[in-house]
Image (cartoon, coloured by chain):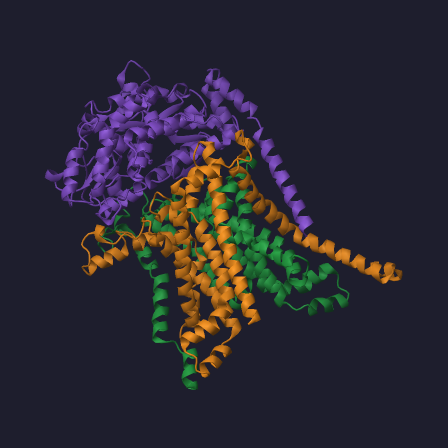
Chain colours: A purple, B green, C orange
Amino acid sequence: MTGLTKAALRKGLMTAGALVLTTALAHGDEAAEQFRADFLDGKLSWEDVSKRAADEGKVNFYYWGGSDTINVWIDSVAAPAMKELGVTLNPVRITNTKDAIDLVLAEKNAGKGVGAGSVDAIWVNGENFYTMKQQDALFGSFAQKVPNAANFDWNPDDPRSLLNLRDFGVVTDSKEIPWSGQQYVCAVNRQYVDAADTPSTFEDMKAYLEKNPGKFTYVKPPHYIGNTFVQSVMYAFNPDGNGGVPFQQSIDDLGAAELARLIKPGMEYLKSIEPMLLGADGGKARYPEDIAALDGLFLNGEVYFNCKFGLYAVHTGLQTGAYPEKAEAFIFPKGLMIANKNYLAIPANSPNPASALLLANYMASVDSQASKLENAGMPVGIDVWKLSADDASMVQKAAPPLYGVTQADLDANVAPDTNASLVDVIEGTWLEYIERGSSSSIEEIVDTMVKQMAQ
Amino acid sequence: MARKATNTFTHLSPFQRFYLVAVAALIVGPFLPLIIQSLAFRWAWPNLLPTVWWMEQRERSPIPLAWDYVLSPYSRVYEATFNTMVIGIAVTVICLAICLPAARVLARESFRGKNSFEFFLSLPLIVPEAAIGIALLMIFINLGLAGSYVGIIIAHLIPTIPYMVRMLTAVYQGLGREFEEQAMILGASRWQILRMVTLPMLMPGVVAGALFTFLVSSNIFLLTFFLGQGKIITLPTLLFSKISGGTLDASAAGITLIVSLPGIILLIISERFIKEEAFGKGFGN
Amino acid sequence: MATQDTALDTRSGRRSTAQRNALFLRIAELAPIVIVLFVLFGGALVLALLQSLGFAPWFGINTFPDFSYFGALWGSSAFWVSLGLTLYYGLVSTIIALIMAIVLSLALIKPFRGKTLYKYLYKLPLMIPYTVGIALAVLMLGNGGILSRLMALVGMIDNPGDFPQILKTHYGWGIIAVYVWKQVPFMTLAIYAVLLGIGRETEEAAAILGATRRQIFFSVTLPQILPGIVSSTLICFAFNVGAFEAPFILGGGYPDTLPVVAWRYFNDANYAFQLQGMATVVSIGIVAGVILFAYLAVYRRYERMRGRA
């Protein structure tokens, strides 16, 4: 008996080991390699791409599937439109964008090269794009080579093109194409908070919480919604008083010591409000893990404010019953409402690269952008000033209503997002200093984080 | 004295009566608010009933709400149900094919090291699933099995085999040898005996084992979640992605009810096949 | 037929042929289960162990044997807190579920009206996934949940924040509630089956001889249902220690339980962390293994002592 089992074990292990090693040595698909090179060199016409896409017949689109409205739009509008182009859209809903990045990197590291992976397109921005770019896991500079690139402003001399060329301060090199433009907007429950009491700065919020403890919280970093809140606090308490300006530099240019100096007052503010956040009187402040959890707290009146990316979040929330009846948006924090874009990226080992390009082009079309705006409440990612008058008015008509604020108010309070190389450091510092209650100083923590990232 | 003593064994004490009711309330009670939640449009604290029902908003809303969403293809409920069924059936069939012959040997023959062998067979039940799941994921990514039906089916075999082999061994043990021996004396071949005598007699036990295996497979979350990589969703992973933030809206409540449905159906069917005694033989040692 | 050809063989020769045939048959019958379990289950465990010791040539890492991953893990205080939490949730819920299951089986064994229906009903949690239990916990036990609303109705609280926090704390009552809800029926089934099998004669005899109810339970009933208790608590405890979804959704955040820690490590793009994740996984296995073996050993010893007495 033991002889048999030992032999079986040895044999099994050897087989497993051999399989593992042979697949690790596998190469990418040569035809896909050729296609990638030809397309990026501009040797292929859009017909050639469409033809190859029809042969591929399928595109695996990985995206954050936490919103029913977006899910419905993808299934009921985008999928049929792609079908007409001869490609079956396979939407893969993930709970966390990082999961898709990890999958791409894991496959890449397992030796799956061009054409041999399983992800064709990812809805992405910021640090996730930065990670893929750093790891050389992107298909290439495609965004200006698809027909609907004309809907974007690519002129580097025009400051309005900034978010097409840079994503969280990282040069995109056209390796991703803008999909939607968002702004960080807070909503308030008017049932409990009247206009006079509504805070407009972080200092106001602290004063409000001193009178009404427990009625505010923010999504927990490393969730990007939480990261963005922390970033706007860092801007507000920047000791130089110039808001987000210094946070546009990369960590290499800024240096650990300078970053620590810049974020120290902000971190201390966050520490000081922690005892007044939701659940803190029960011993431990509660930070919701995601948007759905924050929406639930907001609906039940556990908190009176709800901060997230979402120009039309109030509209969507009222439509689905996720928001309380008296919810409306308000301007907070004054002058520091972070705006950015999110994008579609194609991984280097996309198994259906031509179909992925077709998808990117479709998502950048005026029709799909207007429909997404109207049905899913997702702001457009294309630049309206580049459109014909008819198209521009179509987009305008498609926009859902705003509650409590005007577009002019929102535009007047825009702030830029933070350089992606700083995001991880600030997030790590928050986790260490706030969540884990580390006794080290901010300077030490930032220094350790920066060294860790450099490894 | 004697009469009183017998009473304690045939009648419930007041505490036991209360306890039975309390446990039932604990088990079934939460399903009532769950049903209400699935029909709600806006249901905020401290209301015990929704302030706005889904039916009232149904015509006005541009997007499908609550049950309209759950029962539409957008919710992925059909896809998840289909995957759960396919995986469950495949796992059950493979599991039966592997465990039937093994159970015969374990029930009928004795050999050196049998006790340790039986212990090894139940090891997967007491090794934490996270350990197996993550280790398998590592191997499967390299083999290209991650995110495939085959990968998930293979992984599901690990926690199902121990249950199946124990239940089938118990069935074999309960089955007398006489009929088979008689058939052999009458000149039946091995295959004929298996087909005409053994299998029909094993049938009730096999059905019970199969139902139970299907149930275990359809309830597995962790292995499916780790190895499915979001590409293959089953009912438990679909529900997980809906509630992972720690809230439950109307469509999540509807999906929760749908996810409970196969179990409820199986419960009603299985009571006819799974006898407590048989189950006890599988676990009582 | 073979028997005719070998009719002239010596007795011993014939027996050995038959024996060999039987042996081959037996091996053939056991082969599938052995292969599947050894290759998949054993293979996974061995590979996990190898990787946690620095053997991962497919990432270009091969420093086997390298104990630094375990060193780094066991050297951090967070690991021990996580381990403590993991064992705490596993142990407390197993004990609570066990007590509830024993009381339930003792009641179930008696005849009462509606027993057939009740026997359907109590098994419901057994049949549905843990995620359903988690959803119910979120609905019932959250600060904005049903219990909180009922308390508001009777005027005990006037703000959801005043409701005692059950979910998302390190006391883990939400996690424990889900485990208990799901595992009471499982344990009850195992214990009830044993109770059915043994009959009530010994207990009745003891009662006639004047033993109190407590005496009957501890010296007659409990020893008889012990096998059912041991096997079902083994399975439940091991599951609780290795479970991921309940602590992930209902847990109190950092420090997380070990399976959640392992998952976070594993999801890190930095591959050195994946090996750290493997070390975490192996640690779970070792700790659970040691506890379960000790438990089994104590139980066997107890059985032997009882057998001698």
In the image, B115: left or right of A170?
Answer: right
* Residue A12 image point, x, y percent: 63, 42
Q: Quadrant of the C terminus of chain B?
A: bottom right
Closest to the observer, A120 or B284: B284
* Residue B223 image point, x, y percent: 49, 46
Give above or below for C241 relative to A48: below
Give above or below for B65 relative to B189: above
Numbered marks: total: 0
Q: Residue furthest left?
A: A196
In the image, B67: left or right of B46?
Answer: right
Give above or below for C126 relative to A319: below
Closest to the observer, B147 or C154: C154
Residue occupying the point 31% across, 15% down: A156
Give above or below for C61 relative to C109: above
Q: Quadrant of the N terminus of chain B?
A: bottom left
Q: For residue B121, say whether it is visible.
A: yes
* Residue A445 image point, x, y percent: 32, 31
Rendered image quadrant of residue C8: bottom right
Q: For residue A225, say whether it is visible.
A: no
Closest to the observer, B265 or A94: A94
